[in-house]
Amino acid sequence: MHLYFTSSERHFDDGVVERAFTLGDIPGILWTPASATASVPVPPILLGHPPLGLDRMYPRLVARARHAAADGFATATIELPGSGDRPRWDTLEEARSELRRVKQAGEPVGDEIIDALILPLVDKAVPEWQSALDALLALPEIDGPVGYSGGIISIGVRLAAVDARIAAAGLFAGSFVPRAILEEARRVTIPLHVLLQWDDEGNDRQASLDLFDAFASKEKTLQANMGGHTGVPQFAGDAAAHFFTRHLK
Amino acid sequence: MHLYFTSSERHFDDGVVERAFTLGDIPGILWTPASATASVPVPPILLGHPPLGLDRMYPRLVARARHAAADGFATATIELPGSGDRPRWDTLEEARSELRRVKQAGEPVGDEIIDALILPLVDKAVPEWQSALDALLALPEIDGPVGYSGGIISIGVRLAAVDARIAAAGLFAGSFVPRAILEEARRVTIPLHVLLQWDDEGNDRQASLDLFDAFASKEKTLQANMGGHTGVPQFAGDAAAHFFTRHLK
């Protein structure tokens, strides 16, 4: 599958070029630094995000993209299945209403609910991100070891476990992790930088620590900070940036 | 109490000056960057270390000192009670032999042993580090918010809890923590950067996580890495350096 760039293109003061694209019927965005050319291609980082739609996530994505561009990376992201402008996905909607029901009833969020919410998303999204990566690496201005950053951690784990092109991953321990993904984590051996918001009340801290423990990577770093689910401090972003520079440049 | 500089002085290529001193009968070392003058004093970082004697710890201490000097900090350290050239301390020796006996017998290391090993050291060392700080801050080339870095974590916790001059602490979760210190941690509110070696077999990981959780600081970061007790990776040192620069400059 090829990327088709739409007419939407944006140029930033710092030379970063933002191009919207479609991959089949999946919308996506590519950001490249001014330095990226066919003779000096730059390594790509895939920008993961929560399933809230690219439009809603755009301000945070573009900030991450420009930060990465300043370090010499291209970044790209695609819409998740059932999110944003993509067709409504009943499987996901049902799992979400069941989660809401359980939370409102004050019941514990059991493994079945987590599995139903996360596993179909991982199964569907991961091949899409791999197709996007195929298409990105076919662009002349992009080449090199690939990073994956943020988003639903289970998608990052699966990608790191199954796609040998992913050379380093910066993960955000901020969402539910199915037991099956914990097992897949034991096959992950690439360098990892895992962010955990210590006081994230919506997150199961022990599950995140168990996941970190499960990775087989010889180099793995857990960085836990304060600030709640969305309050990842600026310096944590800088540390993640250093991580990618160490491993992809 | 005043610092008395001994005749031992060393000058490094990077302009760092190392001066041995005594504070009463306690030996210590001060490192200052070339930039430190009475008109432009630099903030100090106290360099903690394990109770193995300054001579044995010297190579690692001088590396940390020169790294900090490059960032514009003075650093200083003093010998711990019962270590190095200081008089043998029976209380400590007895606690150490009891620990050895228990470990050799394959028995669990109980709270009483941890208390006996750590609390007397904290009680005796902390006022000494405070005296050293009094004397350091009386030097014309040293002034500013104070950092504490590394060493026995319980000493760092007590210092951060009782001495308002300590503005930021980088702690190493690599040694036993008495229950009383866990309680003192709840009074610590300064910014903290805590290093934990995730695969440190000699360390109780859960106790370290409980300690990190106990700190009342609004800004606290836990960075867990691989590499065993003494294998703190280079990039972890860089992250700690950024932490001090953020808070002391």
Image (cartoon, coloured by chain):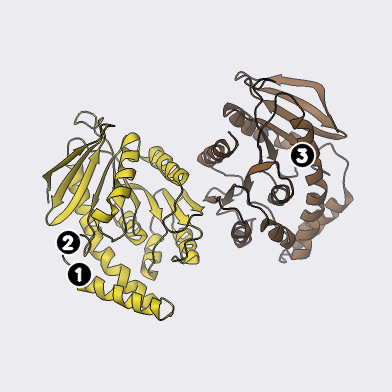
Chain colours: A yellow, B brown
Q: Describe the element under mark 1 as helix, strand or loop.
A: loop
**Of B76 and B198, the residue lying toward us:** B76
Residue ID for mark 2: A86
Q: Quadrant of residue B132?
A: top right
Mark 3 — on which chain does it sit?
Answer: B
For the C terminus of chain A, the image quarter is: top left
Give the letter of the chain under mark 1.
Answer: A
Disc assigned to residue B53:
3
Q: Say whether marks 3 and 2 touch (CB < 8 Å).
A: no
Please report, as a chain letter, where disc 2 is located. Answer: A
Q: Is residue A164 visible?
A: no
Please, is residue A104 above or below residue A171 in the view? below
The answer to whether the residue labelled 2 contacts the one labelled 1, judged by CB atoms less than 8 Å apart, is yes
Which residue is located at x 44 percent, y 66 percent?
A: A202
Whether the residues at callouts 1 and 3 have beta carbons within 8 Å, the answer is: no
Q: Nearer the viewer, residue B194 or A193?
A: B194
Element at badge 2? loop
Where residue B151 appears, as percent x and y from the top left, is 69, 44
- From what the image shows, is residue B75 above or below residue B112? above
Please identify the quarter of the rendering in which residue A154 is found. Answer: bottom left
Q: Are marks 1 and 3 on the same chain?
A: no
In the picture of the structure, the residue carrying the numbered disc 1 is: A89
Could you say which is closer to the camera, residue A94 or residue B143?
A: B143
Q: CA distance from mark 1 to mark 3?
A: 65 Å
Would residue A151 be seen by someone viewing this image from the given angle?
yes
The percent coordinates of residue A193 (x first, y second) are 43, 49
Q: Pinpoint residue B194: horizontal percent, then vertical percent.
A: 59, 49
- CA gap between label 2 and label 1 equals 9 Å
Mark nearest the camera among 3 and 2 is: 2
Q: Taking B207 as reference, is A55 left or right? A: left
- A95 w.r.t. B213: above or below: below
